[in-house]
Image (cartoon, helix red, strand yellow):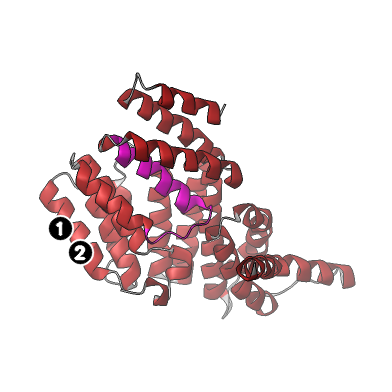
Amino acid sequence: MGQQQNGVSRRQALQFLAALPLVMLGLRQAGDTQSALNAEEILPLYTTSVPACWRLYYGGEWLDVERVLPTYISHLTPLAHQASKYQKSVAGLLSQAHQLASEITIQREDFGASLEHCKQALFYGQVAGDPNLQAGSLIRKGNALFYRNPNRSNLDTYLEAMRYIDDVSPLLRGRIYSEVGLKQGTEQDMLRYLGMAHESTPDTPEDDAYYLYSHSDHYILYFNDALAYLKLGQANDAWKAINQAATYVPDVVNARRMELLKYLVICSIASSDLEEGEHHFKVMVESASVLSSDLWLGDIQDTHQQMLVKWPTEQRVKALADMFR
């Protein structure tokens, strides 16, 4: 019960911090309709509120973030175009806001909007002069392209991110290597890049300055390892890697857990393990109803179809369709 109470109070605190710029602007407009918050006043608000939004998003509360982001972007955009000593800092926060928006519009399956937010995130990362933000924006672009078409390689996007490989934090360096490795055409090159990714990633990713908005960690490495093994037709290795990835995902309903559950089912299919596949599929359906994401509701249908292809005569697989009708 205590942990539950702490969890609720933490969410409420993050919601308060996320809404703070909107509250302050409302107070300013109510008291003085002739003036608006300037960069010096607005920067401390967003320096606190943007990190709160990342924590809400990765905690599964993406609808809370969706509500405030349009105001964030409208506040920060004009200030990011004003020459001042705060311009780079504002632009950096605006890049993060667009990266958040790119992730949230994926949940709505609006991939065009997601890619546009990635473009804006890259631009403002350039204004900020921050290679980590620029590389992060390209990683988001690759993510959006993957969900729009999982069969597309997107190697060109990650090769563009490779331009920053010597300037980004160790955490992002490992993420870039992992993504580039997954897109390689030969087993040797694939495993070489994936190995470099593990070597580059810090033992404690949370200590990396860019962890908060990149949220890259060992989960991503093992998840990409699993995808690579699936491409190579190595079902047992894929199963081991996806289960290793699972150890880095907290037991909360969020986009990352939904991604994990989907590929636990896919690896179960590759390993011909009906028991595991059925179990993880049921959890996936239950979790999707909590998350209220168009993306994952569509993925449930696609994943079930893959199960039917693998086990066309299994009545228990056919019966799973009743869960999401």
Question: Quadrant location of the N terminus?
Answer: bottom right
Query: Tags 2 and 1 in contact by the CB under 8 Å rule?
Result: yes
Which residue is pictured at 31% across the width and 35% down the height? 269
- The percent position of residue 131, horizontal first and vertical second, equals 38, 68
Q: Nearer the viewer, residue 273 or 127?
A: 273
Is 123 above or below relative to 21? above
Q: Nearer the viewer, residue 114 or 276?
A: 276
What span is in magenta?
247-269
Is 268 left, or right, of 260 in this rendering? left
Residue at which label 2 appears: 196
Is 75 left, or right, of 185 in this rendering? right
- The numbered dot on residue 281 is none
Q: Nearer the viewer, residue 79 or 182?
A: 182
Q: For residue 246, which quarter of the picture?
A: bottom left
Which residue is pictured at 42% across the width and 30% down the height? 304
- The numbered dot on residue 192 is 1
Q: Is residue 256 magenta?
A: yes
